[in-house]
Image (tube, coloured by chain):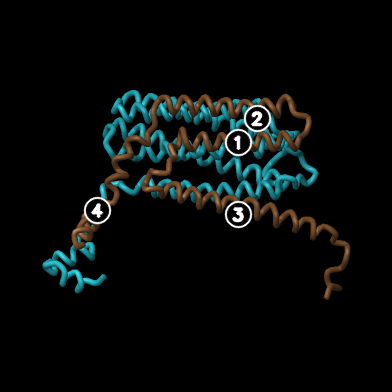
Chain colours: A cyan, B brown
Amino acid sequence: MTATTINAQSNLSPDQLRAAFYELEEHHHPEGGSTMLGFWIYLMSDCLIFAMLFAAYGVLGGNLAAGPGPKDLFDLKLIALNTAMLLFSSITYGFAMLAMEKNDRARTQLWLLVTAAFGAAFLFIELYEFSHLIHEGATPMRSGFLTAFFSLVGTHGLHVTFGLIWLFTLVIQISKKGLIPANKRRLMCLSLFWHFLDVIWIGVFTFVYLMGML
Amino acid sequence: MAESYYAKAEKHVHPNADAHDGEHGSLGSLREYVVGFVLSVILTAIPFWLVMSGAIEDKQTTALVIMAFAIVQIVVHMIYFLHMNTKSENGWTVMALIFTIVLVIITLAGSLWVMFHLNTNMMPMTHDMGQLP
């Protein structure tokens, strides 16, 4: 159906017709309206980085070069503790989001700081594990397995580090400007980021640590 | 007839109006977080226990079981912590997720498959490569 046929059927002015066929005004976008989707797509691309690191670990994981293997190096009790830290930080971040929903500024900050404490504990345990490995001579240069291991687990640890920096930045921003819409949006992005890191950690402890100890 | 075109044009101005309203629901509730947390603890504890105690004799079976637990736990996190649903952002988050899962499967399965065969085929390096046609 063309414009002329419509014009013949109804008595619309050219302006009205144009409005029917073309978008004359720019779309109204609320500020930050597409941030959440954009951030989600960033997380998906981050997921691909981890997929490649997992693939590298899968390919190189068996190349020990006569060096120490997973069974000589990993301590599952430490990993269980580490996993617990990350899980606790996930639910405390959830509590921060619930407090944010109620516009409870102090409680939001409190839960964020509790989350940061668990995140820092996770990082501390991971660094302790790394230093222990390096002390034993299991450096990233030792074998293909260790290179892949340090790349994968180290990249996850770096993500947690940057998540912590982001978290502290937001705590300061909230104390300066309060729970304004922009800060709420940022908190929601960090929420996605933080829970996403927990999802990646499920893959790490299953494929690297648990299956390595079998 | 022309009326419907008007309606369409009108709708175009606020395409995200519905999605914006739904955003408040995507934060989750206390119940949701607690259920997700309890499920995660259970789904984490069982694989750790299986490996640390060696409850299942066969290693292949244990590996398959803990992989199954990992997949279930990832789904639990997606639903209870990341609040994934098919409606958020008009379904685009789910579309991006499905696309990513396809790429991840291709990356992982493809790499492992190709490199496994490469290792198998390249292993015997006894002959002088210069003599090959």
Q: Label 1 is placed on what type of residue?
A: Ala
Disc nearer the start of the sequence (4/2): 4
Residue under label 4 = B11
Which quadrant does the C terminus of chain A fall into? top right
| Residue A1 lies in quadrant | bottom left
Determine whether the residue tagged by mark 3 lies in a helix, strand or loop.
helix
In space, the residues marked 4 and 3 are separated at their CA atoms by 39 Å
* Dot label at residue B47: 2
Q: Residue at x 32, y 44 (%)?
A: B19
Circle 4/circle 2 CB separation < 8 Å:
no
Q: Specify the subunit that label 4 lies on.
A: B
Q: Residue at x 43, y 30 (%)?
A: A93
Which of labels 4 and 2 is toward the front?
A: 4
**In x, y percent, where is residue A102?**
30, 27
Disc nearer the start of the sequence (4/1): 4
In space, the residues marked 3 and 1 are separated at their CA atoms by 19 Å
Circle 4 residues within 10 Å: few <14, some 14–19, many ≥20: few
Circle 2/circle 3 CB separation < 8 Å:
no
Q: Label 3 is placed on what type of residue?
A: Ile
> Mark 4 and mark 1, same subunit?
yes
Disc nearer the start of the sequence (3/1): 1
**In x, y percent, where is residue A94?**
42, 29
> Mark 4 and mark 2, same subunit?
yes
Q: Label 2 is placed on what type of residue?
A: Pro
Residue under label 1 = B70
Toward the viewer: A124 or B10? B10
Q: Residue at x 39, y 49 (%)?
A: A38
In space, the residues marked 1 and 2 are separated at their CA atoms by 8 Å
Toward the viewer: A107 or B23? B23
Residue under label 3 = B106
